[in-house]
Amino acid sequence: MGRIHVLDPHVVNQIAAGEVVERPASVVKELVENALDAGATRIGVEVAGGGRDLIEVRDDGHGIAAEDLERIFLAHATSKIQAVEDLRHVATMGFRGEALASIGSVSRASIVSRLPDRDDAWRVEDVEGRISPVTPAAGSPGTIVRVEQLFAHVPARRKFLRTPQTELGHIRALMGRFALAFPHIGFRLVQAGHVLLDAPPQTDRRLRIAQVHGDEVARGVLKAQALDDEPTLEAWIGPPSLTRRDSTLEQVFLDGRHIRDRTVAHAVREAYRDLLPPGGRRPVAFLFLSLDPGRVDVNVHPGKTEVRWHDPSAVHRVVRRTLRAALEGARPGHGVELPEAAHDHGASRVAAVEHAFLRGAGRPAEAPAFSFPAAARHEGGPDPWQPVQAPERPASRTTLGGLRPIGQALGTYLLLEDGDELVLVDQHALHERVLFDRINARLSEQGKLEVQRMLVPSVVHLEPAALARLLEATDVLKTLGWLVEAFGTDAVAVHGIPAVLRRPDPEAALEEIVELLERGSREGLDRTALVSEAVDRMACRAAVMAGDSLHNDEIVALLEQAESLNHSHSCPHGRPTRLTLTKAQLERWFHRTV
């Protein structure tokens, strides 16, 4: 090894650039954050070559004095903090003082700035770490930063950039997030004369969502608020019918700063648990959190995209409860008419459609209304845990309010008539929802499920690691109605199973639980999340299946038990339970209308 020496400042800045300046979008992020901290009300960004050739950021903020321009490109030069104590109460977007020095070390950068109360502007340039003297220039009040030929003289970095189209996609997505976080500020993005985002200042967050992501998303989202909690939360979330194939429209902001946080992400998943369609669909969710800067550390990542909460459990609780309450209170078919102003910014909506993260998203499914009419309960009717499999059928009934069962189709779908509508119900999906809610209610009331003891214990053989994992979770198993104990060195003896199970298969069920426990360990799921997931799977196993034959009275019993559910329109996995065809639709289909 060589002797220890102090690195040249230029080398230090290039090392910092490796952390701060990952790609052109990183440069745009740092410069726009500076403009926001400068009190700008309008911020314009122009790029060329996807930001590789040119990035120019203009703002109408309070500008930079000539004497400050002399230090602007120096490492750790900042106006936003002065002492260690300031790091505990960071209230600005930028504060580390690394960005401009790092950007200048890997590009040709220049700044022209003018104070609002002055007639003269000043200019300074940094070409790969060589800083020019400050000279007079022409310019409007505010600041213009130009960054040209990014990484041109650092070929090892430039070759790792993606195509200009891909880099432009990252910049578009970034500018969309800024626009959402600061609706009162105007944002504009242009490349080669084409306006990709035009978002004038807005007072209504829903209208801002329309400007960035289009009217369809803006109409579909629900507003949820928790203004008396800590942190406070304003959220705009999609109902279960408004989903995407990836998580790019799950966006979290803390006091305007876009963050990626496992605590909040898990809370969102918990809020949507059992509501989303199958196939890995993800919700649309824009969350705007606000918290006393002293209760969160935003200085744990060079890009300031991660935070450390003083009380993460409080954050999780506020997010999960607020979102879940809004989803529970929503009704299928939710939609909002937007004022005409939301339709005035065609360029931004076109840009939103072109976003890489919206490609292939498609239109959200329209959720049909699903609410059963009130009806008298069966006295002495079927066991609520087995609502459609009672050994003794009650007296025949033909109606449930205005709903008249007709029979089964294809051994899977219940056919009913409701006024001038024909209704098809997925019997497994609806029964699964009924059982899921009843199991959760029983757990809430009693803390555990009933056990059905086995006359002869069932022995289930497991791999050593799976066996150890299962035996470590015996308290969770007892809560769910399982009684197991070790049997030798490679098996467990099952003495009791959950009474709710219709088709007991201890081996398959326990293998499923082991898989769930392993996933929970990988993802850091807590006990509540594990139990909820297990209930989801138990409800699926206990529900009637496709192909199970049901009598009309059993159909009525199932429908009656679905009356009080909040989400009888979807199964615990978010799949719809019902399809409605109106008489008018049928007549159009059969050309009976003139």
Image (cartoon, grey):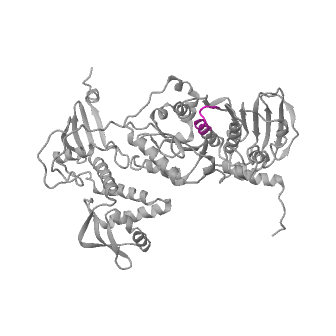
Residue ranking furthest to the top: 594
Rendered position, 85 above or below 25: below
Please give left or right for residue 250 compared with residue 468 in the image: right
Rendered position, 553 above or below 525: above
Residue depicted at 48% across the width and 35% down the height:
217
Quadrant of the frame with the N terminus? bottom right
Foreground residue among 174 and 494:
494
Residue 182 in magenta stretch? yes
Percent from the top left, x then y, of residue 72? 80, 42
Residue ranking furthest to the bottom: 488
Foreground residue among 92 and 537:
92
Picture quadrant of residue 588: top left
Please give left or right for residue 207 compared with residue 168 in the image: left
Residue ranking furthest to the left: 395
Percent from the top left, x then y, of residue 297? 63, 52
Please give left or right for residue 396 compared with residue 21 in the image: left
Q: How many marks?
A: 0
What is the span of residues highlighted in magenta in the rendered image? 175-187
Percent from the top left, x then y, of residue 40? 69, 33
Quadrant of the frame with the C terminus? top left
Percent from the top left, x then y, of residue 462? 38, 72
Residue 118 in magenta stretch? no
Residue 280 appearing in the image = no
Residue 133 appearing in the image = yes
Residue depicted at 61% across the width and 29% down the height:
201
